[in-house]
Image (spheres, rainbow, N blue to C red):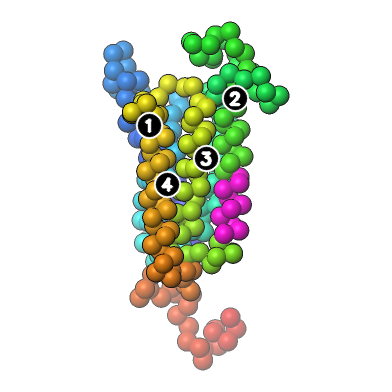
Amino acid sequence: QIADVAMWAVPFGIVGGRIYHVITTPDDYFGDGGKPFDAVKIWEGGLGIWGAIALGAVGAWIGARQAGLAWPPIADSVVPGVALAQAAGRWGNWFNQELYGKPTDLPWALEIDPENRPRATPDAATYHPTFLYESLWCIGVAVLLIWADRRFNLGRGQVFALYVAAYCTGRVWIEALRVDEAHHILGMRLNDWTSILLFLAAVVFLVISRRRGDSREPSPYRVGHTPASDSATSDSPAADER
């Protein structure tokens, strides 16, 4: 069933990640010298995690409906894996020498080739490996989700909301180190504002959900839906064998 849901979630997530990237960097495609058709060249790189999660969630909702499953338990069950996937995906920035942080001489600093260095600091050879920071943070988020789910009996989308809040917390301080070009609003990077707004929304959802006493669903199936595998009655041979 998870594989069936993924058939919807994965392509939706890829498209959503690309849409967010194009929307937040429109000058690269629609500005002076930009080529609008390049917006669809996903093989040349450029995905935004916010768009991937948002549209991927829509795809997961559609897939869950097709499978007769409720969306919240699906989201809660897969999101630790999403965090680990982000941890792995961030290493692509290392291969591409991109999205790194400010110059530093720390022992774990990342050496950047001259052609990939910022124009403002061409003589600085080593920089903060922000991809590494985010990768480790995402691993920590995955561990937190599994622990909190078992400790507090989370459910009905609460694990997913905790993921959003925890990831956004790390993204804010990681963004403060990054030196790649980005749009700014009131002196802050666009991704900072996105992180803050999503963090607040996730915390509000968690508070309201916990006050209502929501906890893990006894069944992942939608109300009124009976899967074929559960259709046997309690006094049938098939039910006894189960």
Answer with mark 4 or mark 3, whichever residue precedes in sequence.
Answer: 3
Q: Secondary structure at mark 2?
A: loop
Cα separation, mark 2 vs mark 4, equals: 25 Å
How many residues crowd around disc 4 within 10 Å: few (fewer than 14), some, or many (20 or more)? Answer: many
Mark 4 near mark 1, Cβ–Cβ under 8 Å?
A: no
| Residue found 55% across the figure and 61% down from its top | 149
The magenta-colored residue range is: 139-148
Number of marks in the rendered image: 4
Q: Position of residue 3 (x, y in %)?
A: 50, 55
Distance Cα–Cα, label 2 vs label 3: 15 Å
Disc 4 target residue: 199
Q: Quadrant of residue 190?
A: top left
Looking at the picture, how far across and down is residue 178, in whole percent? 50, 26
Give the residue number, with chain letter if any, for mark 1.
Answer: 190
Q: Earlier in the sequence, mark 3 or mark 1?
A: 3
Q: Is residue 67 visible?
A: no
User: What amino acid type is highlighted by mark number 2?
Assistant: His
Mark linked to residue 170:
3
Q: Is residue 16 above or below residue 200?
A: above
Q: CA distance from mark 4 to mark 3?
A: 11 Å
In the depicted view, which residue is nearer to us: 62 or 233?
62
Identity, as a three-letter code, of the amino acid under mark 4: Phe
Type of the residue with mark 3: Gly
Asked whether, in this view, residue 59 is left or right of residue 101, the answer is left
